[in-house]
Image (cartoon, rainbow, N blue to C red):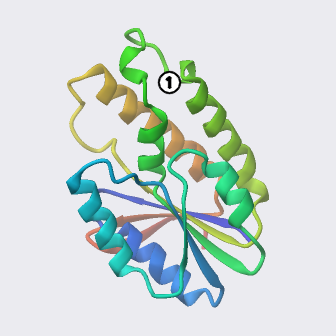
């Protein structure tokens, strides 16, 4: 089968759209969640996502080792939803605040290793895999170096994943717009 990439802004309906596709796939659904509950706001967000998911879906927590989790979870008879690449990226950028100005995140060993592993794995994933990510490049330019690094790396990651997926959909106001694929 092939991989699909769904992106959009915050609260755009992208996760709901991915869940609808997974529900209608006829396959066993597994969710790979990348969020970490490091504060109360994130705990509330995670709880909202958990409440929205149908009972019986298997959930794997993978805040950093996403490629390993995908390799262990994806199978021909499964639909895997990865929610979301943007939080995964944020987890991998830990330590980026110490990089010299204008340095790229490739100087962070965990980031470089995990990103390369994911991009190498996507073309050979079995079953149906749906990646969810935020489109962060449509807003204001962040004031901080770290904010700009995050925005830039998110844009680069989104471009690389979109190139590898057979279908790419942008969601705004709950409405999906297919950018690539039938």
Q: Residue 58's image quarter?
A: bottom right
Rendered residue at 69%/78% (across/down): 78
Q: Residue 174's image quarter?
A: bottom left
**Above or below: residue 133 compared with residue 18:** above
- Residue occupied by mark 1: 105
Q: Callout 1: few (<14), some (14-19), or many (20+) C-alpha neighbours within 10 Å?
A: many
Q: Position of residue 130 (x, y in %)?
A: 57, 67
Rendered residue at 47%/54% (across/down): 34
**56 to the left or right of 136:** right
**Above or below: residue 61 compared with residue 78:** above
Q: Position of residue 60 (x, y in %)?
A: 56, 65
Rendered residue at 46%/88% (across/down): 55
Q: Position of residue 9 (x, y in %)?
A: 30, 56
Q: Position of residue 3 (x, y in %)?
A: 65, 64
**120 to the left or right of 50:** right
Nearest the eye: 2 or 76: 76
**Above or below: residue 125 compared with residue 113:** below
Rendered residue at 67%/44% (across/down): 119
Quarter of the image with the N terminus is bottom right
């Amino acid at each position: 089968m092939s991989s699909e990439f769904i992106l959009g802004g915050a609260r755009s309906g992208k996760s709901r759209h991915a869940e609808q596709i997974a529900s209608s796939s006829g396959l066993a659904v597994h969710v790979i969640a990348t969020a970490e509950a490091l504060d109360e706001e994130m705990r509330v967000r995670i709880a909202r996502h958990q409440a929205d998911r149908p009972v019986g879906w298997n959930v794997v927590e993978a805040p950093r080792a996403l490629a390993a989790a995908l390799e262990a979870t994806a199978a021909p008879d499964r639909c895997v939803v990865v929610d979301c690449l943007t939080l995964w990226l944020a987890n991998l950028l830990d330590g980026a605040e110490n990089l010299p100005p204008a340095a790229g995140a490739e100087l962070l060993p965990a980031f470089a290793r995990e990103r390369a592993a994911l991009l190498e794995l996507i073309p050979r994933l079995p079953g149906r895999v749906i990646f969810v990510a935020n489109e962060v490049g449509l807003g204001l330019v962040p004031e901080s170096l770290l904010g700009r690094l995050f925005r830039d790396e998110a844009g680069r990651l989104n471009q690389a994943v979109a190139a590898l997926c057979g279908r790419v959909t942008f969601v705004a106001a709950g409405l999906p717009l297919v950018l690539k694929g039938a």
